[in-house]
Image: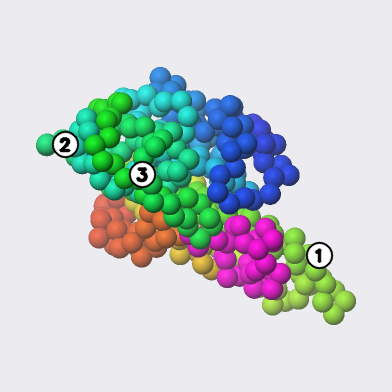
């Protein structure tokens, strides 16, 4: 099934150039086929499918530097609503990264990636003694626009007595930390996809470009750099894939796997970007070159939902027996 999904999405992406902002035509195509809500149960308004199917789409979109918020829509907003027993409404729904205040009427300033394009916002909100999952209309909310290094919207929405359209109590295991971990998993997948794009571009460039009458790929120093780039990319891909499998299987060590994936992919991101630009030379720094669409995403996504230091600290402090189980495949 994943192969078929990748084939269909790949056909949608074929021939498209990376854009900044929001590729609305591509989003319309993806939403029309249900790919924007893969992994979200059908009864919650999603397209069903598993986490691996969703990861395949998110990975491919990252590889092509597609300017669409599938990770934010399905990985975060759809997951948050479905876990609370709420339905995903029509249109683009994004998730707040911060808790709001209140219950039926909300207040606060909340970060919401792609918020300027959203029709709805889902957020965790703290009531009297409970944590709620709340859906509000996003259109018309005051907004402070910002972008990351790749030009992706990273906005802040201002809630000032906004009335909720759907409200439910959050399950015990759904809180700000769970949402952060979910976002870290999404970014790990995206980082691996972007790294693969850098590797493919570098391989193509050194195979085609000549110096002193022979392809760059024939020089030993270039081969060493390319081998290092491939090794980093494989490590990123393996760690992201392992985290997806652990989360989908409900593995007790899933939290450790996600932390390890984000630590690995964030740490490798700057290495991959640096080697990629070194192999491309000055050409790779031009705004028109496709390499920049991948490396700016590597630099930006490396920091989002916690960089490698943040997740290395979590592994050091909270890994415990889960680390041992993950490494050995058994208990002490």
Does the image show residue 120?
yes
Q: CA distance from mark 1 to mark 3?
A: 50 Å
> x%, y% of residue 178?
30, 44
Q: Residue at x 66, y 33 (%)?
A: 8
Q: Residue at x 61, y 65 (%)?
A: 229
Residue at the outermost top position = 43
Assess disc 2: are there few (<14), some (14-19) or many (≥20) residues with their C-alpha within 10 Å of its C-alpha: some
In front: label 2 or label 1? 2
Mark before the other along the chain sequence, 2 or 1: 2
Viewer-proximal residue, 3 or 326?
3
- Residue contact between numbered discs 2 and 1, judged by CB atoms under 8 Å: no
Instruction: State the predominant SS element of the stretch in magenta.
Output: helix
Residue corresponding to mark 1: 208
The answer to which of 273 and 145 lies nearer the viewer is 145
Please give the residue where the numbered disc 3 appears in the rendered image: 142
Name the residue: 46% across, 64% down. Answer: 267
Residue closest to the eye, 243 or 147: 147
CA gap, disc 3 and disc 2? 23 Å
Q: Residues within 10 Å of mark 3 (few under 14, many from 20)?
A: some
274 is within the stretch colored magenta? yes
Give the number of the mark in front: 1 or 3.
3
Could you tell which of marks 3 and 2 lies nearer the N-terminus? 2
Where, by quadrant of the figure, is residue 107 drawn?
top left
> What residue is shown with label 2?
127
Span shown in magenta: 272-300
For the point 12% across and 36% down, the residue is: 128
């Amino acid at each position: 099934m994943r192969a078929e999904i990748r084939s269909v999405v790949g056909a949608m992406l074929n021939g498209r150039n990376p854009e900044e902002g929001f590729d609305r035509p591509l989003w319309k195509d993806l939403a029309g086929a249900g790919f924007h809500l893969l992994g979200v149960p059908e009864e919650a308004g999603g397209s069903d499918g598993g986490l691996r199917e969703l990861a395949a789409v998110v990975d491919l979109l990252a590889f092509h530097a597609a300017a669409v918020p599938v990770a934010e829509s399905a990985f975060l907003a759809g997951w948050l609503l479905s876990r609370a027993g709420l339905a995903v409404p029509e249109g683009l729904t994004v998730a707040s990264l911060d808790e709001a205040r209140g219950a039926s009427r909300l207040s606060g300033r909340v970060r919401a990636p792609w918020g300027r394009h959203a029709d709805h916002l889902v957020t965790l909100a703290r009531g009297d003694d409970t944590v709620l999952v709340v859906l509000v209309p996003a259109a018309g909310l005051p907004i402070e626009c910002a972008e990351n290094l790749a030009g992706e919207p990273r906005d802040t929405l201002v809630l000032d007595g906004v009335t909720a359209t759907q409200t439910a109590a959050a399950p015990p295991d759904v809180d700000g930390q769970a949402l952060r971990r979910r976002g870290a998993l999404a970014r790990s997948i995206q980082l691996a996809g972007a790294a693969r794009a850098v590797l493919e571009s570098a391989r193509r460039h050194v195979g085609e470009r000549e110096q002193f009458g022979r392809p760059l790929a024939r020089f030993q120093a270039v081969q060493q750099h390319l081998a290092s780039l491939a090794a980093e990319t494989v490590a990123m891909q393996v760690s992201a894939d392992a985290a997806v499998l652990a989360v989908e299987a409900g593995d007790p060590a899933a939290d450790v796997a996600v932390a390890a994936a984000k630590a690995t992919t964030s740490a490798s991101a700057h290495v991959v970007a640096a080697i990629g630009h070194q192999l491309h030379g000055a050409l790779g720094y031009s705004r028109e070159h496709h390499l920049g669409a991948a490396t700016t995403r590597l630099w930006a996504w490396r920091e989002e939902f916690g960089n490698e230091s943040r997740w290395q600290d979590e592994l050091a402090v909270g890994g415990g027996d889960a680390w041992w189980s993950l490494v050995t495949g058994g208990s002490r």
